[in-house]
Image (cartoon, helix red, strand yellow):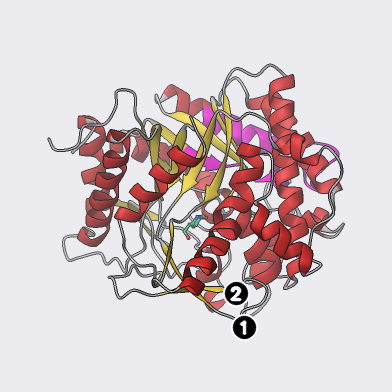
Amino acid sequence: MQYVFPKDFIWGAATAAYQIEGAYREDGKGENIWDRYSHIPGRTFEGHTGDVACDHYHRYEEDIRIMKEIGLKSYRFSISWARIFHDGKGTPNQKGLDFYRRLTEKLNESGIKPAATLYHWDLPQKLQDLGGWANRDTAGWFADYAAYMFEKLGDQVPIWITHNEPWVAAFVGHWIGRHAPGITDFRTALQAAHHLLLSHGQAVRAYRDMGCSGEIGITLNMNPVYPASEKEDDKAAAGMYDEYLNRWFADPVLKGSYPAGLMAYFQEMGLLPEMDDGDMELIHQPVDFLGVNNYYSSFIKYEGSLWPIPAAETMTGRDRTQMGWEIYPEGIHDLLMRLHRDYEGVKILITENGAAFNDIVNREGNVEDDNRLDYLYRYLGQVHRAISSGADVRGYYAWSLLDNFEWGHGYSKRFGLVYVDFRTQQRIMKKSAHWYRDVIRNNGF
Ligand code: IFM
């Protein structure tokens, strides 16, 4: 074998509530911002919604059987806040909680470690009506919900993730407007980003105060950032883009401050978010790990006119996945080494990595997704290379276990190791899932 991974390496796969659960108004679940947004005509591909998705809410037992067949050591899923608190706060919904207890108990019985994300973009709509993440109170309501989950599921869940990709929640949801709640205001996005970070800190503090015995961290979407050319403008733009995409979240969590360059720039532009004394200390709680989601790399050119960040991603001509994301496996190596260098001692879980391709079921009823298998093979090879060079990577979760609702793209992009026929809900393990099963069995490939 060429690549042997460390003993006890966590091999997993990931999903998120809105993308797979369906049952969107069952058993007392409240409306969330993705329920609302996906029902607005024109917001998602062909009007797709997560109303049914993979129907995982009813089929979780079958899905756990598949996880067992693949041999997953851990399963990363997210909890739907509005299933637990219909209005985001107030009286908890027992039936919603029961679902996650059934799920996590079954996972543990099956020898699969649950890794629960508390927020994967599905804010209860009632809280959005009160200002959503732009409202500072939302951070406190999130911490209350988090503490409730720690109390009720702490005995079943050893790995907790406060937020998934707060950059996307803040900037794609509140500036670019291509995700719920569909706002297009940069100042609101920066304020939302600050409150997302604050809510992370408050939840971690609650976890510690409650004396919970598991591990807690946050998951960030991170790309290695390279200048598109040797030009000074491009180099400066790449530095700024790195502060925006990676460091705006990683620095406050791991170092207790926002990156200085972009802080000064936002100050000059009059864009700084409102913050209170003590916020940065609160955000800077010791975490047990940093969750890293990486799919591609950013090659940045200076773009004078692109307000407010005068930097833009550019293409380099490499092969692309169905998302249009260029395949550059060395990027994940560079990213992991950079995190190892810049955030000393950081323990990393790769909480997402994977690829969308146009899968088809062949005459034999199989899905021969060699392109995805190749992608995973090459990226995992580079993860191994980073580990060999000292990066402290403890686990890897493929995105995704199942084909699912890919946000604005609806069901048109398939990321799963397992194919889902959305008309019949039939599941088929793809060739990549069979390969991944062998990787897990051998702890390498
Ligand atoms: O599907 C998403 C997931 O919800 C968050 N990270 C990126 C994935 C692929 O776009």
Question: Which stretch appears magenta?
Answer: 76-104
Regarding residue 80, the answer to whether it shows in the image is yes
First along the sequence among labels 2 and 1: 1
Amino acid, disc 1: Ser
Does residue 123 appear to the left or right of 131 in the view shown? left
Q: Residue at label 2?
A: 310
Q: Is residue 366 magenta?
A: no
Residue at left 84%, top 37%?
91
Q: Residue 109 falls in which quadrant of the image?
A: top left
Rendering quarter of residue 66: top left
Q: State the residue in front, 181 or 434.
A: 181
Q: Position of residue 255 (x, y in %)?
A: 63, 38
Q: Position of residue 209 (x, y in %)?
A: 74, 20
Q: Quadrant of the C terminus?
A: top left
Element class at badge 1? loop
Figure check: 392 above or below 316: above
Q: Is residue 77 magenta?
A: yes
Q: How many residues crowd around disc 1 within 10 Å: few (fewer than 14), some, or many (20 or more)? A: few
Q: Residue at x 67, y 49 (%)?
A: 26
Q: Residue at x 25, y 64 (%)?
A: 361
Relative to 100, is 231 above or below?
Answer: below
- Of 39 and 199, which appears nearest the observer? 199
Are the residues flagged by discs 2 and 1 in contact, CB closer than 8 Å? yes
Q: Tell me what residue is drawn at x 56 percent, y 58 percent.
A: 245
Q: Mark on residue 305?
A: 1
